[in-house]
Image (spheres, grey):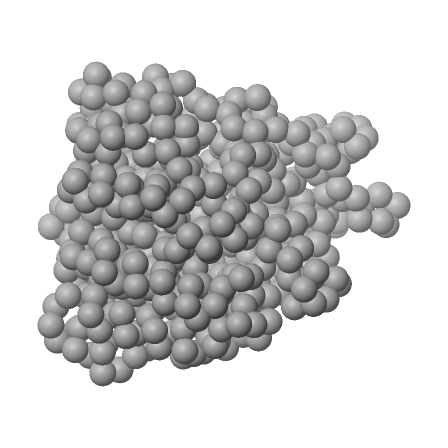
C-alpha cells in the first residue's frame, strides 16, 4: 500500500522537536513492504498547501497523522494545535480520495492520541487511532485493511465497531532498536533552530507521579536497549548524516523520560561512548533525583554531555510527597551538588498548584530555586497551574474533591490550581525571586520569541553545539534585560479557566 505519514507538530517550546516516534513507525512500515513517505510539516509556512501537494504526488491508500501535543500545558500562555490539525484533516479528507471516490482511511497516532485514545476519533473525525507503540500495530492495521481481516487483534487500536467507539487492549513491545530517523528527516532546519537529535535508550516508566500521563504512551514496564546498540545508532547517524552534504548533528539528546533510572544503564551507555571514542555532544531531558550515584555526572561529562535537564518538580518535602515523586529533598540536594560539581549547565523544572499546595509550600519551592540554583549554570522554570490529563492520579483527585465534575472533558483545557493558593500571588512570588535570581523564568515566558530566535541563529552560525537554552542564563543576567524584567513582569493570572 502507498502510505503517507504526516508529522503535524509546529510547536516551538524551547526547541523544535523532530519526529522520532513517527520515524520508528515509518521504518517499520517500510520494512513490512509498503511504499512510505513521511511529510514533515514542522517548518512549513503553508502546511495545508504542502499537505495537498504531497497527497496529489503520492496518492496514498492510507494517511497517518501524528499528533504530538494536546496543548502546551501552560495556563497563562495557553496554546492548542487543534484548529491547525482540524484544517489538516479537512485537506486530507478532501484530497486523499481513492479511484472509487471514497476517502482514504485516516489513522491517528502520536503521544497526544495515546492520551486521548478513542476521544481523538470524535475530535478529529478519523477512522482509526493507535494508542501506545505503533511499530507493530500500524503495519498490522494496514495488513487488515488490505486483506479485510478482523481488527479485534490489533493492539491499541481505537475504532468504531458497529458504530460504537471501541479500544483494543494495548500491548507493549518486548524491545526496540534504532529509529531510522536519518532516512526520513531533513535535519538542517532543526539544527538551525537549536534542535538536538533524539535518542531513546529505554521505554516505559514504573514511577507513579500524580500528574503524569507518560505510562499511557509507553507503559509502566521498562524495556532497555543494550548500551552497544545505543552507541551503534549514534555512530550510524554520524556517518549517515556526515556524507553527501547532509547536515551532521552537533548534539544528541537522550529523550527517555528518566535517563538515569536505573543509573546502571545510563552509566553503561556513557562508558560505551567513552570506550569507543565517540566525539560528539550529548544532553538529556530527564535526570531524576531518585538515582544519581556519585560516578554518574563525571561519566556524563567525560562522554561529552554539555547540559542536562533535572526534574524535581518541587523544592519542598511536602509537595514531593504529594506528587508521589519517590525521592526526598535530601536526594534533590545531593543531585544539585553533583550537578554543580560536574560543571554541566542544567535546567530545573518546578510545578506550583497541585492538591495540597499552600502559599507556604509555594514560597518554599520558589525559595529553593532562588537561593540554591543561583548562578549562570542553572536555569529554573516554574509552571503555575497543572494541566489535568486523563487517567492520572491528579484527575482522580480533582474529581474526588469536586474540583472537576466526573464528566469533565480532559481533552479540553483543564488546569488545577489548589484552592489554598492565589494564582496571581504565586506569580508575584516568582517575580520577586526573579528580581534576586535572573536565571528563573515562568513557563509562560517561553515559546518562540524574536529575541530567542535571533540568539539561536547567531549561535548556530558560530557553529555552537545545542541545546541553546544553556545560554539563556547569560542572556537573562544581562543587566538591561534583568532590569526590564524586574520593571515589567510579563505574566498575569491564567487566561484559561479550570
Q: Where in the figure is residue 118, as x and y percent of width and height?
A: 72, 49
Q: Nearer the viewer, residue 474 or 210?
A: 210
Q: Nearer the viewer, residue 318 or 362?
A: 318
Furthest residue toward right? 162
**42 displayed left or right of 332:** right
Report the residue at 67% width, 55% height from top: 396
As drawn, 160 above or below 243? below
**Res. 79 in view:** no
As drawn, 251 above or below 299? below
**Res. 362 in view:** yes
Q: Where in the figure is residue 20, as x and y percent of width and height?
A: 44, 38
Q: Nearer the viewer, residue 250 or 209?
A: 209
Q: Where in the figure is residue 468, as x and y percent of width and height?
A: 23, 52
As drawn, 184 above or below 443? above
Report the residue at 20% width, 47% height from top: 345
Report the residue at 56% width, 72% height from top: 419
Quadrant for the C terminus in the image: bottom right
Q: Where in the figure is residue 132, as x and y percent of width and height?
A: 60, 38
Query: How many numbered tags mark residues here?
Result: 0
Amino acid at each position: 500500500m502507498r502510505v503517507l505519514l504526516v508529522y503535524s507538530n509546529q510547536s516551538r517550546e524551547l526547541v523544535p522537536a523532530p519526529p522520532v516516534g513517527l520515524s520508528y513507525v515509518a521504518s517499520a512500515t517500510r520494512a513490512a513492504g509498503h511504499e512510505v513517505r513521511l511529510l514533515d510539516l514542522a517548518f512549513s509556512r503553508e502546511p495545508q498547501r504542502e499537505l495537498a501537494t504531497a497527497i496529489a504526488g503520492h496518492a496514498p491508500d492510507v494517511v497517518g497523522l501524528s499528533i504530538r501535543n494536546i496543548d502546551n500545558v501552560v495556563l497563562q500562555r495557553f496554546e492548542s494545535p487543534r484548529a491547525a490539525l482540524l484544517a489538516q484533516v479537512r485537506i486530507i479528507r478532501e484530497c486523499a480520495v481513492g479511484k472509487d471516490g471514497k476517502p482514504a482511511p485516516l489513522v491517528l497516532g502520536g503521544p497526544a492520541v495515546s492520551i486521548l485514545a478513542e476521544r481523538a476519533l470524535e475530535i478529529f473525525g478519523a477512522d482509526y487511532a493507535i494508542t501506545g507503540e505503533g511499530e507493530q500495530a500500524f503495519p498490522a492495521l494496514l495488513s487488515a485493511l488490505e486483506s479485510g481481516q478482523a481488527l479485534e487483534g490489533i493492539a491499541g487500536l481505537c475504532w468504531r465497531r458497529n458504530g460504537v467507539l471501541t479500544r483494543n487492549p494495548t500491548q507493549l513491545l518486548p524491545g526496540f532498536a534504532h529509529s531510522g530517523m536519518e532516512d526520513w528527516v531533513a535535519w538542517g532546519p532543526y539544527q538551525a533552530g537549536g534542535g538536538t537529535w533524539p535518542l531513546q535508550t529505554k521505554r516505559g516508566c514504573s514511577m507513579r507521579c500524580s500528574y503524569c500521563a507518560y505510562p499511557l504512551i509507553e507503559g509502566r514496564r521498562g524495556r532497555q536497549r543494550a548500551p552497544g546498540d545505543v552507541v551503534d545508532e549514534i555512530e550510524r547517524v554520524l556517518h549517515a548524516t556526515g556524507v553527501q552534504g547532509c547536515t551532521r548533528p552537533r548534539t544528541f539528546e537522550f529523550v527517555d523520560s528518566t535517563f538515569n533510572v536505573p543509573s546502571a544503564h545510563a552509566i553503561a551507555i556513557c562508558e560505551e561512548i567513552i570506550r569507543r571514542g565517540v566525539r560528539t555532544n550529548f544532553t538529556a531531558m530527564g535526570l531524576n533525583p531518585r538515582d544519581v550515584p556519585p560516578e554518574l555526572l563525571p561519566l556524563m561529562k567525560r562522554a561529552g554531555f554539555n547540559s542536562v535537564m533535572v526534574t524535581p518538580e518541587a523544592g519542598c518535602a511536602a509537595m514531593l510527597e504529594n506528587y508521589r515523586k519517590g525521592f526526598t529533598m535530601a536526594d534533590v540536594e545531593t543531585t544539585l551538588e553533583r550537578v554543580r560539581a560536574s560543571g554541566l549547565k542544567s535546567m530545573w523544572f518546578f510545578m506550583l498548584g497541585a492538591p495540597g499546595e499552600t502559599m507556604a509550600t509555594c514560597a518554599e519551592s520558589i525559595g529553593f530555586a532562588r537561593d540554591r540554583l543561583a548562578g549562570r549554570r542553572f536555569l529554573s522554570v516554574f509552571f503555575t497551574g497543572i494541566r489535568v490529563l486523563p487517567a492520572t492520579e491528579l484527575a482522580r483527585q480533582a474529581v474526588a474533591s469536586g474540583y472537576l465534575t466526573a464528566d469533565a472533558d480532559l481533552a479540553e483545557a483543564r488546569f488545577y490550581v489548589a484552592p489554598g493558593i492565589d494564582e496571581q500571588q504565586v506569580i508575584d512570588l516568582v517575580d520577586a525571586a526573579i528580581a534576586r535570581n535572573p536565571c528563573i523564568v515562568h513557563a509562560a515566558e517561553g515559546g518562540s520569541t524574536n529575541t530567542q530566535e535571533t540568539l539561536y541563529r547567531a549561535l548556530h552560525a558560530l557553529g555552537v553545539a545545542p541545546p541553546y537554552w544553556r545560554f539563556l542564563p547569560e542572556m537573562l543576567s544581562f543587566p538591561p534585560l534583568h532590569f526590564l524584567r524586574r520593571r515589567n513582569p510579563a505574566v498575569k493570572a491564567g487566561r484559561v479557566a479550570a
